[in-house]
Amino acid sequence: MEKKGISLKTIILFSWPVLLILGLLIWRFSSKGENRAGKKLYQMYCSNCHMEKGEGLRNLIPSLENSSLIDQSPEKLVCLIRNGLDPENPTAQNPNIKLVMPAHPTLTANEITSLIQYLQQSWDSQKPLISFQTVENEINNCP
Ligand code: HEC
């Protein structure tokens, strides 16, 4: 049999380890870099007050780590983020907190989706991640 440069067989034989390593790298980085958009939004709009890990600030800012809203009813976060929250609001978890949370009316449905999904992922919520559709519906019905 005549040799014609690199045969298909050689390519197949030697390419699979390369593909395997490439696949592993892609898998690793995509699971590591999960929801970067949401994290960025959190750092931009929320972590100033609620702190980097959502621990809050004593009786001034509530902890998000312990907020049952994120775990139980993530859809309630939509209007809370859009409209802010004051001490008169029944969703406030800690009655000792007297500060008002500012409204974020410029955040889009897309951004709010990423943001809430990031909170759900970071706090290991058992519920399925909130969908864009749910966020959009909530926004349309915000008070
Ligand atoms: C200027 C400070 C400030 C910023 C910025 C801020 N918050 Fe708040 N947040 C508060 C305060 C103060 C409260 C409590 C208000 C109350 O109880 O009346 C609160 C309450 C909350 C609650 C309700 C917690 C509970 O269980 O009662 C959630 C959830 C929340 N914030 C999420 C966010 C998210 C998400 C962002 C980013 C988009 C954000 N906050 C940005 C100050 C802030």
Image (cartoon, rainbow, N blue to C red):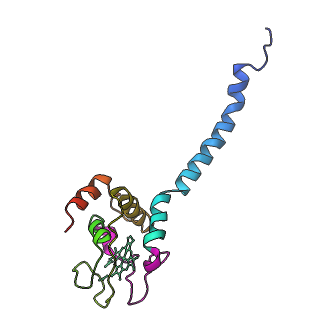
Q: Is residue 46 left or right of residue 17?
A: left
| Magenta part, dominant SS | loop
Q: Nearer the viewer, residue 44 or 60?
A: 44
Residue at 79% from the left image edge and 17% from the top image edge:
5
- Quadrant of the snapshot with the N terminus: top right
Image quadrant assignment for residue 63: bottom left
Q: Nearer the viewer, residue 109 or 28?
A: 109
Q: Residue furthest front?
A: 106
Question: Magenta residues?
Answer: 47-72
Image quadrant assignment for residue 90: bottom left
Q: How many marks?
A: 0
Q: Is residue 132 left or right of residue 27?
A: left
Residue at 24% from the left image edge and 61% from the top image edge:
138
Measured along the vertical axis of the image, is residue 8 above or below residue 33? above
Q: Is residue 73 left or right of residue 52?
A: left
Magenta segment: does it hold 63?
A: yes
Residue 36: give x, y in percent of width and height. Answer: 50, 59
Residue at 70% from the left image edge and 21% from the top image edge:
9
Q: Nearer the viewer, residue 26 or 85?
A: 85
Magenta segment: does it hold 70?
A: yes
Image quadrant assignment for residue 95: bottom left
Residue 100: give x, y in percent of width and height. Answer: 32, 83
Residue 22: give x, y in percent of width and height. Answer: 64, 42
The image quadrant where one finds ligand 1 is bottom left
Measured along the vertical axis of the image, is residue 87 above or below residue 129? below
Q: Is residue 97 left or right of residue 56?
A: left
Residue 12: give x, y in percent of width and height. Answer: 67, 26
Residue at 54% from the left image edge and 56% from the top image edge:
33
- Quadrant of the snapshot with the C terminus: bottom left
